[in-house]
Image (spheres, rainbow, N blue to C red):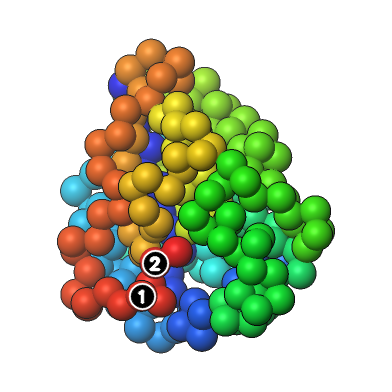
Amino acid sequence: MTKLYFIRHGKTQWNLEGRYQGAHGDSPLLKESYTGIKDLAGFLTPLHFNRIYSSPLLRAKTTALELDRLLPGNIPVTIDDRLREFNLGQMEGMQFTEVEKQFPRELHAFRYAPADYNPENIAGENFPDLIKRMRPAICEIVAQDNGHGQYLIVSHGAALTALIQSLLGTPIADMRKNGGLSNTSVTTIETTDSGESYQLLKWNDTHYLQKELDPTDTI
């Protein structure tokens, strides 16, 4: 049995401002996010992790390295470019309210109707291409495991939602069925057949955070 713990990065300034960051935009973690990461580490401390994998984007990498600092055992950290966020093209850096005015069709499909999302007009990345990019990274993690490992994967809200649902066999049209992912959340899945199938254990767990979530925490 291999368990995968998917972590969405800590909250950033652009998250607070309601801006899309995407694969090329980035902003620093808020001061309060380090408290959230500490809360997360406290929840994860009783578990043993073989390795931490992280997106190279600063908000995810900072979260991963802070977790590594706080967790026992000197866990190896691997930065994998395939774990970066969706390329959102022209939407990156824009506030959601601005996107709604300029690209209403793309915004609605991206949030509520993934099967209808066509990002050609904004020079972005679609759901099938994102899944094609990300899934091999997970396949490699599972393939090299001895069947008893546990791994942390630190990435981004929209990308992780699509990736995890694809691993669970969810059609693209239904990828929002469990909702989005909150900053510093954990979503846990497992496989008992070396990645032939996956089972969801917990979606978007934030019970350990010592703060009340607001709408800017979840995407």
Instruction: Tell me, yes or no, if residue 10 can be seen here.
Output: yes
Residue in the picture at 57% in, 27% down: 140
**Quadrant housing the C terminus:** bottom left
List x then y, in percent, for residue 104: 64, 68
List x then y, in percent, for residue 81: 68, 49
- Does residue 21 lie above or below 61 as drawn? below
Residue position for label 1: 215
Left or right placement of residue 172 versus residue 8 in this view: right
List x then y, in percent, for residue 82: 66, 45
**Quadrant housing the N terminus:** top left
Residue position for label 2: 218
Residue in the picture at 34% in, 68% down: 37
List x then y, in percent, for residue 134: 61, 39
- Does residue 175 lie above or below 180 as drawn? above
What type is the residue that disc 1 sits on? Pro
- Does residue 129 lie above or below 185 as drawn? above
Q: Are marks 1 and 2 in contact (CB under 8 Å)?
A: yes
Q: Secondary structure at mark 2?
A: loop
